[in-house]
Image (cartoon, helix red, strand yellow):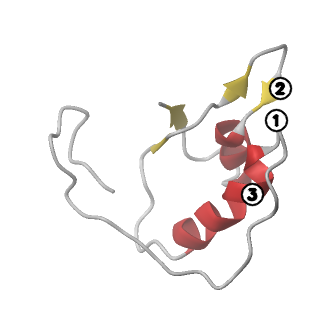
Amino acid sequence: MQADSWQATAPVSEISKRVACTPAKYEPGCFYKRELPLLRTLIDDLEFEPAVFAIDGYVWLGGENKPGIGAHLFESVGRAIPVVGI
């Protein structure tokens, strides 16, 4: 979804895609292994560069410097687009 502001009550647009693949099995503490490849298939097809990614997940997991899916997403885009975990 894309919103025109943080106060937006509805998205400006939505993007979805069917992906013919089998996601990795769930591994505690390694959610990114399952979800990041699927997120990247959408991101790689975007016709614009987002100003920020807001994701339904953790950027950092509990504990010292343990990256969550948000940190892995940030790294996968070359640290070029901020990621906010919600």
The residue wearing badge 3 is 34
Three-letter amino acid code of the residue under disc 1: Gly
Q: CA distance from mark 1 to mark 2?
A: 9 Å
- Name the secondary structure under disc 3: helix
Picture quarter containing residue 65? top right
Q: Is residue 76 above or below residue 56?
A: below
- Relative vertical location of residue 16 with respect to residue 5 in this rendering, above or below: below
Q: Residues within 10 Å of mark 1 (few under 14, many from 20)?
A: few
Which residue is under mark 1? 29
- Assess whether mark 2 and mark 1 are in contact (beta carbons under 8 angstroms): yes
Q: Amino acid at mark 3?
A: Arg
Res. 23 image quadrant: bottom right
Which residue is at the front of the view, 6 or 29?
29
Q: Nearer the viewer, mark 3 or mark 2?
A: 3
Residue 85 relative to residue 3: left or right: right
**Circle 2 sits on which residue?**
66
What residue sits 84% from the left and 14% below the top?
64
